[in-house]
Amino acid sequence: MKKINVKELAEAIEKLCIESNYNLRSDVFHALRNSLNVEESKIGRVIIKQIIKNAELACAKQLPICQDCGIVNILLKIGQDVVLIGGTVEEAVNEGVRKGYGRGFLRKSVVCDPCFERKNTGDNTPAIISQRIVPGDSIRVAVMPKGGGSENVSVVKMLLPGDGPEGIKRVVLQAVKDAKANPCPPVVVGVGIGGTFDSVGFLAKKALFRNINERNSDERYAVLEMNLLDDINSLGIGPSGLGGKITALAVNIETFPCHMACLPVAVNFGCCALRSAECVL
């Protein structure tokens, strides 16, 4: 058994909060550069170049890529041979977020009550924490600051089994059409399929953590990802919603078995400043 003090977890999350807000993911950055070879719209090319320049300046000056530094989503894969000591995981995670957002001068966007008071918590906690127990003696920590604009256009739809792939396509394409410019395209579209009403949204969010150059390991879903990307980029929404060929950089699908009477589908958007960072303890 390997002992890991939760202080190490807090310190890692503190660093990852800052790193992810300052540095655009390399897969997204390179996809934006490559999209200049495809985008034909003059204004679309100008916007993509501005997005790239913004990311370069944020990295060079170590400043946030976007003024919306998001609510923090944490994915923890905890090895079953790890013993965590010194406190609780939840306390450690929120301590890391609290320190990271303070030290990094990152905007705090979390409010304590969702409906009535809506008073800012002042330190961007609590974070959204998802944990899995996996084989091994290490902890994989992934952090994603998620902005409100891209989150607000998320969709969950409970389809019937007979709706099949075509029904899924209709849900995703309608979500993109309805979102228009609000999620700050070019976007990455995370799609969750299966599970239950409460878990399918997590699948869509989980899909955004995956490198956008990696296709689903199931060839059928990999083809669906590519077909959806082509369909989305045929809509003409374009960068910042001002027209063009590049509305999305990628479509990532995550799946889970579901009840035989159900076909849950969720869509979660990653904006042009899709941010995440990870490490292993």
Image (cartoon, rainbow, N blue to C red):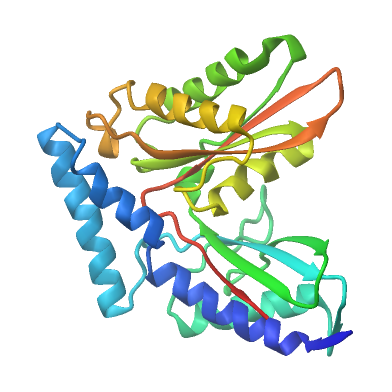
Quadrant of the rendered image containing residue 73: bottom right
Q: Against 232, is 90 above or below?
A: below
Left or right of 211, for residue 93 = right
Q: Residue drawn 50% across and 26% down?
A: 175
Say which quadrant the C terminus sits in. bottom right
Left or right of 76, for residue 169 = left
Q: Residue drawn 61% across and 62% down?
A: 119
Identify which residue, 95 or 139, lies in the foreground. Answer: 139
Identify which residue, 79 or 265, lies in the foreground. Answer: 79
Q: Against 52, is 212 above or below?
A: above
Quadrant of the rendered image containing residue 139: bottom right
Q: Residue drawn 20% across and 61% down?
A: 53
Left or right of 241, for residue 176 = right
Say which quadrant the N terminus sits in. bottom right
Q: Residue drawn 43% across and 40% down?
A: 250
**Where is residue 183 shown, x and y percent of the image?**
41, 41
Q: Against 124, is 192 above or below?
A: above
Q: Residue furthest front?
A: 219
Identify which residue, 64 or 277, lies in the foreground. Answer: 277
* Circle count: 0
Residue 98 in view here:
no
Residue 25 in view here:
yes
**Where is residue 103 shown, x and y percent of the image?**
48, 85
Q: Residue furthest left?
A: 42
**Where is residue 33 shown, x and y percent of the image?**
24, 51
